[in-house]
Image (tube, rainbow, N blue to C red):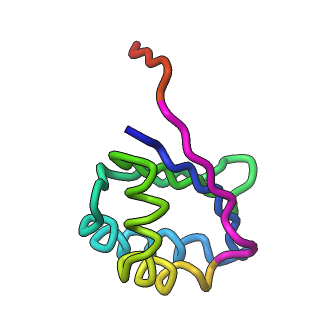
Amino acid sequence: MITEIAQIDVKPGTEKDFEAAVAKARAAFGRSKGFHGFELHKSIEKPQRYRLMVKWETLENHTVDFRGSENFTEWRGLVGQYFASPPEVEHTETVLTSAG
C-alpha cells in the first residue's frame, strides 16, 4: 500500500469552495484502479494549506493509471482553479504504525 501526500496551497478565501470541490471529486477517485480511500487535512497554522492523503494499491496506480485517466482530468477540473501554486506530491510507504 502506497500513500500519496499532496501538499496543496489554495488561494485565500477559496478554502470552503476547495473543500466542496474535493468532496465532489470523491467519485472520480472511487472509479480509479487501485484506489483505497483518501483524507483531506487542513493546516491549523496555515489555513490555506491542505494535505491530501490518498491510499493506492501500487505507485503505478497513481502515477500511471490515475494520472493518465479521465478521472484525473475530472479531479483537476474540479479543484485546479483553487490552487495558489502547483501541488507538491510525494509517495510514502508505511514502515511503523501505532494505535493508542
Asked whether 53 or 12 is in front, the reply is: 53
Asked whether 11 or 8 is in front, the reply is: 8
Q: In this view, does 24 lie above or below 98?
A: below
Quadrant (top left, top right, bottom left, bottom right) of the C terminus: top left
Q: In which quarter of the image is residue 9?
A: bottom right
> 7 left or right of 79?
right
> x and y percent of residue 53 in the render?
49, 49
| Magenta segment boundaries in residue numbering | 83-93
Q: Is residue 46 above or below residue 1?
A: below
Asked whether 34 or 54 is in front, the reply is: 34
Q: In this view, does 60 lie above or below 29?
A: above
> 63 left or right of 29?
right
> x and y percent of residue 40 in the render?
48, 54
Q: Does the magenta stretch include residue 91?
A: yes
Q: Which residue lies at the image location 74% right of the left edge and 54% below the top edge?
A: 46
> x and y percent of residue 31 in the render?
24, 69
Quadrant (top left, top right, bottom left, bottom right) of the N terminus: top left
Q: Quadrant of residue 28?
A: bottom left
The number of numbered badges drawn on the structure is 0
Q: Is residue 29 magenta?
A: no
Q: Which residue lies at the image location 51% right of the left edge and 80% below the top edge?
A: 76
Asked whether 61 or 40 is in front, the reply is: 61
> x and y percent of residue 74 in the render?
41, 83
